[in-house]
Amino acid sequence: MAIRLVANAACWLSLTVDGTRVVSRTLDPGERVEYQAHRSIEIVAGNAGALAVTLNGQPAKPIGTPGQVVTTTITVESLKNFLQYP
């Protein structure tokens, strides 16, 4: 699984890929992070509506609203549930 997150506004982000935390900081507007995962991706976002998420090159559904704190886990099995156009 490939994930890309782009911040449209400041957003605190903790990203765990296959059990290893790879990001734990505030993203600035316009900043993006990209990672590959084999099993799972856990996202904790402090301003979930500020993140545009792409999974395997396809747009994902919003994970939350502006200002909302969200924790979500994407697995290989649940990936299609997160896509805008499965």
Image: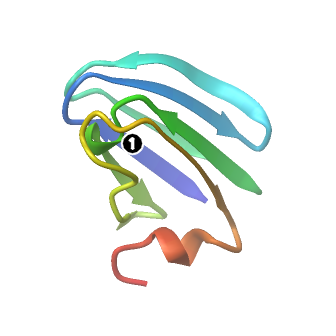
Residue at point 42% right, 72% down? 83
Give the percent coordinates (x, y) of residue 29.
20, 25
Residue with the mark numbered 1: 5
Nearer to the camera, 6 or 43: 43
Q: Is residue 21 visible?
A: yes
Residue at point 53% right, 77% down? 80
- Left or right position of 6 against 71: left
Nearer to the camera, 46 or 35: 46
Eyeballing the image, is 23 above or below 47?
above
Q: Amino acid at mark 1?
A: Leu
For the C terminus, the image quarter is bottom left
* Quadrant hosting residue 54: bottom left
Eyeballing the image, is 24 above or below 21?
above
- Left or right position of 86 against 62: right
- Left or right position of 36 against 34: right
Give the percent coordinates (x, y) of residue 34.
47, 39
Residue at point 24% right, 40% down? 66
Q: Is residue 37 visible?
A: no
For the N terminus, the image quarter is bottom right
Give the percent coordinates (x, y) of residue 51.
31, 42
Instruction: Say which element carries label 1.
Output: strand
Nearer to the camera, 62 or 33: 62
Eyeballing the image, is 15 above or below 64?
above
